[in-house]
Image: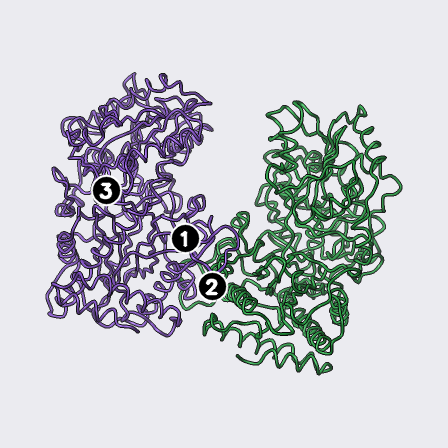
Chain colours: A green, B purple
Amino acid sequence: MWSRCSLGALRTHRYPYLLTPAFAQTVRFSSGTTTTMDAVKTRTVDTTERLAKLRELLKKPENNVKVFIVPSEDQHFSEYPAHSDERRAFISGFNGSAGCAIITLRDAFLFTDGRYFLQASEQLDSNWKLMKQGLPDVPTWQEFLSKHLEQGTRIGIDPTLISAVDAESLQKSLEPRGSELVSLQQNPVDIVWGKDRPPCPHNSVFPLDVKYAGESFQDKLQRLREEITKKNAVASVVTLLDEVAWLFNLRGTDIDFNPVFFAYAVVTPTKAILFMNDAQVQQSIKTFLGSDVEIRPYESFIPSLRQLTATLGASKDKPMLLGDKTSLAVVEAIGQENAVLIPSPVAAMKAIKNETEIEGFRKCHIRDGAALIRYFAWLEEQLNKGVELNESQAAAKLEEFRSELDLFRGLSFTTISSTGPNAAVIHYSPDPDDCAIIRKDQVYLCDSGGQYLDGTTDVTRTLHFGTPTNEEKRAFTRVLQGHISIDTAVFPTGTSGYIIDSFARRALWQEGWDYRHGTGHGVGHFLNVHEGPHGIGTRIAYNSTPLKAGMTVSNEPGYYADGRYGIRTESVVIVREADTPNNFGNGYLCFEHVTMCPIQTKLIDFSVLTAQEKEWLNSYHAETLEKVGPLLRNDLRALQWLERECSPV
Amino acid sequence: MWSRCSLGALRTHRYPYLLTPAFAQTVRFSSGTTTTMDAVKTRTVDTTERLAKLRELLKKPENNVKVFIVPSEDQHFSEYPAHSDERRAFISGFNGSAGCAIITLRDAFLFTDGRYFLQASEQLDSNWKLMKQGLPDVPTWQEFLSKHLEQGTRIGIDPTLISAVDAESLQKSLEPRGSELVSLQQNPVDIVWGKDRPPCPHNSVFPLDVKYAGESFQDKLQRLREEITKKNAVASVVTLLDEVAWLFNLRGTDIDFNPVFFAYAVVTPTKAILFMNDAQVQQSIKTFLGSDVEIRPYESFIPSLRQLTATLGASKDKPMLLGDKTSLAVVEAIGQENAVLIPSPVAAMKAIKNETEIEGFRKCHIRDGAALIRYFAWLEEQLNKGVELNESQAAAKLEEFRSELDLFRGLSFTTISSTGPNAAVIHYSPDPDDCAIIRKDQVYLCDSGGQYLDGTTDVTRTLHFGTPTNEEKRAFTRVLQGHISIDTAVFPTGTSGYIIDSFARRALWQEGWDYRHGTGHGVGHFLNVHEGPHGIGTRIAYNSTPLKAGMTVSNEPGYYADGRYGIRTESVVIVREADTPNNFGNGYLCFEHVTMCPIQTKLIDFSVLTAQEKEWLNSYHAETLEKVGPLLRNDLRALQWLERECSPV
């Protein structure tokens, strides 16, 4: 699944958040959380009173700002915020995944992009002006602040909700008008929200056994300490939830789909301090971490940072290392002169999977493939029998099959189960109360994934249960050729995903087709399904991170015919050293695919497939049959379906 | 032919200059200029006296500098400097194409790269220290200036020989040590050189008929004026020789291989001033330019700039437009506050060929192909007869065939005629007095091109006149697959050559092979064989210039096995609008190849070629036979060779 684009300068990926608590009090994930979505989506909230209260707070002497920014982000820049962090939804009434609210003393503006124009216009009350970013002459919220406000405006922000990097560039753009960004001590939205604000989740936290993680947290800390020494720093501050979870081999269920928990960490050459909610510090966690890690309360993070900066003697020459997604609040606590913002060393370490993690990826993808194959076989039978099934009911069946698998811990994102025109909506997710019936005469696209103790999956297959049109077949084949071109690519050490992205598009371009999303994102190991810093795509940022052996990345070209059909073929691949006949330069890399699920040959236009591509397909199907077949002993329907779908072409 | 890399931050492309005057007093080019190369190459010049005189000048009060930089550049950043501009060769004795001399009051350093370590060590006398750039712990000349000199050193430079952009970044790097770059009024090397300095060439200049240029110079001026108005500027200053030549539809023979003449131009909304040597202003030029262009002496350029800046009222808000390769001297004359440095608008206009130029490209490439085919047929016969021929003798025969062609005006660069291991030297050019005998049992690589009134050619073919090894065939085929992949690429509007470069390398990468040069450079229309701003390659700068319909670009992947053999297959292609079945987005582009010369099928390893690639090859050969065949009526040997080489596979 390709991550949703973010709004303007916000560089985090996000999914539409879910309004019901997803995983409360259980180690097991569940995505059965969309049931109330529809009702909420169309409900307009009266924000008159909220806005009036907020404006009173803005005018108070301790704030004294004329404008307040309410972004979508939480303090960890999580892809999915917890409900307690849905401040923008609370203040505006608009609960789409991407948007930024700007409230002045007189007006209120909600900035969002084309995916949410309709939803926002339905949800916003008359207090709000919808700013349709992307339309001509509509500024981004950053441009609005720098160009459409009076000279010398004081603009309030909660410094925990904006990255220091974004804050700096925003501040720079404000300078020509003499405006300034003002960090407020307490978020006024939280004050207005008051007792109605949901509590911050603190679900149970559990250690991930080294038999899955492949490396003890002590060894990871040791490697991080080497980085700290190499960079001549006094400490590394870890603020992203998946980085903390990875570093300490801990997992949680505070955030939908992402097995993480609310925490920060500071690592010095001799100490490791983990900041987490007291309620989550069970005895098992204390025992697991032992004397190697000091646990402090989550709330004490910012004051502790101030104190640590002094104790450690952080300075320009001996700085604290901060990842480039660190919040302004953290930088302010440490002092800009004592910190250095760099691409996160933990992200770089986490991106390269060790052999245990890689083996886990292989295994969980085989199991995950079995669930998917059972599902497709079942779905085909239902449709052939004439059973009426909507997209959401079908997705629930897929989740049921997945939930029977060993080591399953929930979905890795909301299943995209989409028929016909819905498949052309790149980030479609079916509304259980109002979604389409899956039709035999339409393309069906299913993008889904699971969380397992031994890895995370993300797979898309597009199928047709009737007779596809020639155009659908041509599009499917061109997408498949791009997929094969990435799968079989060999490239020199040092090559980034920016450079090889064109391999995935070449065949589509021949037809005058393309797709407006990336080709591949990193995939966490029993962690976030989207992780960086690498990726395959047209974002120039990807050019800064060469692909390295051990990195996981999705391979998911697609094509979307608006209002008609959509096609995507996605597998997860792992970067490996290539055994090339020669070695000009400094070594070559290639991909190993771990996703095991047939690619529907019925949808192939063989007139454009090369002999080599046909060979690849047969070999992939032989491998899939061999690896997944044995898991389907108790589901004859699935086994027969698999055997048929894997027949050589 | 791929352009030679430049040294350090110098971004001009250059070829080894030739020591004898090449085209003096003739409109016809000749490359028969390498006869004295060998002798000169190994001669050591005693620079003691020159250096002593130079140091006296540096100490004079009007200079008062402790260091002086002598780069390779001329004041127009030409690829090939005139002999009068070979200051670095004069002062150091080293005459390779790339290098920078740094002279302090005590020491003298010559910085060059791996291609010239041997030649430089042979040519430099004991006054000089050779700085082998690229070796570990050897600084670039810029690093040397910023890190290896005393605090507060005044460093002299001739501001006409360094671009303002490079000067600024150099100045910035000097600041931490408080050193500064000082523009000297007169180049002290020129004073030392004195009467021995060759005169600046002023060979004849001639108009290029609009039947070849396709657009009158008045219309070009008009388009440039529209750019000036659009940019809210008062004038555009044109300092590169090929830009001046293109803008005024004039050509000259002052520089080897490049049909240009020494000139500058300033264009305002109402005026066009051409600065050129009086001796070159013949009546035909005056008549051609008429009242649309004012001609002023070349020497008056800098004083005129000062005066024009005042007259035109240039300012920050109404600046003079300067191309990004403009010299520091020009910026100093105008005043930095009155100028804006941008990618040259003339370069952008020149890069997109009009339909007349494109038709000229097609035609001259067919004629050029005929000469090349005659040559290869002749060469094969000679070798089969057992005639002993060295690389240079063979190249001379090729020039002879070219010189018989209509509209021929000389070579576009020194012919690379190389056998076996010499073919692995990417920028090899045979020394007539000491070069290899072409062997039937070795790969033969020939990279050559011509200047014609209707276009410029640049073509590489690699052949084997005996029995190639399996490895040579595999390498040839992988290179060919990259060549075909570029030739057949379709890509969306807005795509740069940086993005599609990987298409050319993919097949080689599969073998663990690659090449350390770009894949394609722009080709001028009866102008420099290397032109920008676009290109296909791994230089990130190419990512700033999308390929556009009408641009020419070479398609020249290669593979080089050091000490054994080298392979390159190069054709010139023109970017055209693609007629794709669909149009997702904003249009698609493709390439039209214009080079017409067979690709040797004997060298193909058919086990890795796809059916589609075979089809491409047969179609290319059928096209070549059809287009060039009729030109070979009087050379039966060549026609038979062509027919055999174009037989379908």
The residue pinned by badge 1 equals: B577
- Count of marks overlaid on the render: 3
- Quarter where residue B319 is shown: top left
Indicate which label's residue lies in the foreground, 3 or 2: 3
Relative vertical location of residue B226 with respect to residue B610 in this rendering, above or below: above
Image side of residue A280 versus residue B292, left or right? right
The residue pinned by badge 2 equals: A490
Cα separation, mark 2 vs mark 1, equals 30 Å
**Other residues around mark 3 within 10 Å, as few (<14) / some (14–19) / many (≥20):** many
Is residue A451 or residue A174 the one in the foreground? A174
Cα separation, mark 3 vs mark 2, equals 40 Å
| Residue at figure coordinates x 43%, y 54% from the top left | B500
Same subunit: marks 3 and 2: no
Q: Chain of mark 2?
A: A
Type of amino acid under label 2: Val
Cα separation, mark 3 vs mark 1, equals 29 Å
Q: Secondary structure at mark 2?
A: strand
Q: Secondary structure at mark 1?
A: strand
Indicate which label's residue lies in the foreground, 2 or 1: 1
Type of amino acid under label 1: Glu
Image side of residue B509 versus residue A191, left or right? left
Same subunit: marks 2 and 1: no
Is residue A576 or residue B634 the one in the foreground? B634
Q: Locate residue B89, reporting x and y percent.
A: 22, 37
Q: Secondary structure at mark 3?
A: loop
Relative vertical location of residue B413 with respect to residue A377 in this rendering, above or below: above
Type of amino acid under label 3: Asn
Same subunit: marks 3 and 1: yes
The residue pinned by badge 3 equals: B258
**Disc number at residue B643?**
none
Q: Locate residue B617, reporting x and y percent.
A: 32, 67
Assess whether mark 1 and mark 2 are in contact (beta carbons under 8 angstroms). Answer: no
